[in-house]
Image (cartoon, helix red, strand yellow):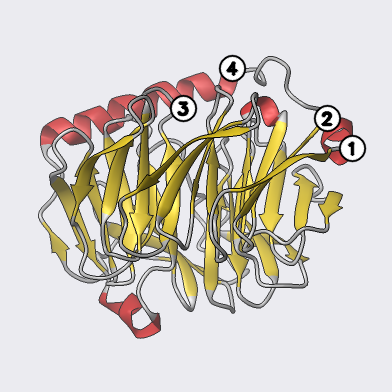
Amino acid sequence: WVGESGGGGGAAAGGGAVAGAAAGELSAAVVAKFDATNKELSKGRKKRPPPPGQASAEQVAAYSKLASSALHGKGSVCVDSHRSEPLVATGGADGVVCLYDTAQRKALSKMKGHDGAVHRVRLHPRAAVAVSAGADASVRVWSTEERTETAKMALHAAAVTDVSIHPTGDYAVSASADGSWKVADLSSGGCVLSVEDAASLGSGGFSCSEIHPDGLILGTGTGTSAKVWDIKSRANVASFDVEQPVSCLSFSENGFYLATGGAEGALKLWDLRKLKNIHTIDVGAPVRSAAFDFSGQFLAAAAGTTSLYETKSWASLAQHKAAASGVSFGAAASLLAAAGPDGKLTLYGSA
C-alpha cells in the first residue's frame, strides 16, 4: 500500500515497531479472513467500473439544496450515507442516532442510547446494521430494520472518537481519547484486538480514525500527527506531520490517497505510495469532516462552508454556504448529505 521511500513532505516510516503496548494479537482465523477480504477487494478494484449512474463533475458542481431537516438539538452532528440505499444515519450532540430516508425526505427513527454526544455513526454496506461511537466511552450497534439498539460495547476508558466497519463486515474498529484503538466482533461484542499508543496520550489520545478500504491498515489522527497502522502486526508503519491537530481523515476508495483535515483550516492530501503530502487546500476554517465518494472521483469537506473537489487536480467544484460538521456522499455521488452544528441535515443534489 505504500512505496519503499520514507520520503519527504512531513512523512516518516514507522520502522515496523509496535508503538505503545498491545494487548493480544489477532487469531489465525481472523487474520485469514482479513487476508481473504483484502485479496478479493484488491483484485476487484482494478477492474471495477464506476457505479451505475455515477455523477459527473459537471453534475456535482451544479448541485443545489434539495431538502433540510432539523433532526438534532444544537451541536456537532456526524453523518453517513448508505453505499447503495436511500438511507442516511446521523449522530448528534444530543446522544441521538437518527435514520433518514433520502428518497422520501423524512426521518425514519430517532434512537436514544448514548449518554452524551455521538461522535461517529456508520452504516453497514451489506447488512441492516449501524454502529456509533460516543462520548460515553461506548460503541453501540443498532438494527436499522427494527430501529433499536442491539448491543453496547464498553471497549474504552474514555470517549470513543471514531468507529469504522471493517470491510469483512464482521468487525468494528474504534479509536478513543484513551489512546487506544480496538477491533471488536460485531456478533459477539467481544474485543479481538486492543492496541495502546502511549505517545498519543500527550495530545489527548486519538481524535479520529478510519479503516483503509482493503482492511489491513488503519489511519488515526492525534493532536500532532496522522498515523497509519498495520492491523495484523499492530505496528505504526507511517506517520504524517500535519502541523495542526487532526480533526478528521478519509481514505480514497482506490486506496492510494489519505485526506486529513485540521483545526487550523488545512485539508491535506497524502499519497500513501510515496508517503508524501501532494496537495494542500486552505479551507479557511477548521475542517470538521472529509469524505471521498465511492468512485474516488470527488472529495467533500465540512468547515465554514460545505466544499466539493474533484480528485484529478483537486480543483474546487462548488461551495455551499451552510456550515457543516459532517459530510457523506450517497450512492454514485448522486447526493451529498451535510450535517450542521445547528442540528440540521441538508441534502444536496441535482434538482
Is residue 210 visible to the viewer in this orientation of the structure? no
Q: How many marks?
A: 4
The answer to whether residue 317 is above or below residue 44 is: below
Distance between the alpha carbons at the discs numbered 4 and 3: 10 Å
Distance between the alpha carbons at the discs numbered 1 and 4: 29 Å
Q: Nearer the viewer, residue 86 or 37?
A: 86
User: Callout 3: helix, strand or loop?
Assistant: helix
The answer to whether residue 117 is above or below residue 190 is: below
Task: Say left or right for 75 vs 230.
Answer: right
Distance between the alpha carbons at the discs numbered 3 and 1: 33 Å
Q: Amino acid at mark 3?
A: Ser
- The residue where tag 2 is placed is 350
For disc 3, the neighbor class at 10 Å (few under 14, some 14 to 19, many from 20) is: some
* Residue occupying the point 83% across, 30% down: 350
Tell which circle, 3 or 2, labels the residue nearer the N-terminal end.
Answer: 3
* Image coords of residue 14 (percent x, y): 38, 65
- The residue where tag 1 is placed is 62
Distance between the alpha carbons at the discs numbered 3 and 2: 32 Å
User: Callout 2: helix, strand or loop?
Assistant: loop
Q: Quadrant of residue 72?
A: bottom right
For disc 4, the neighbor class at 10 Å (few under 14, some 14 to 19, many from 20) is: few
- The residue where tag 4 is placed is 47
* Residue occupying the point 35% across, 74% down: 205
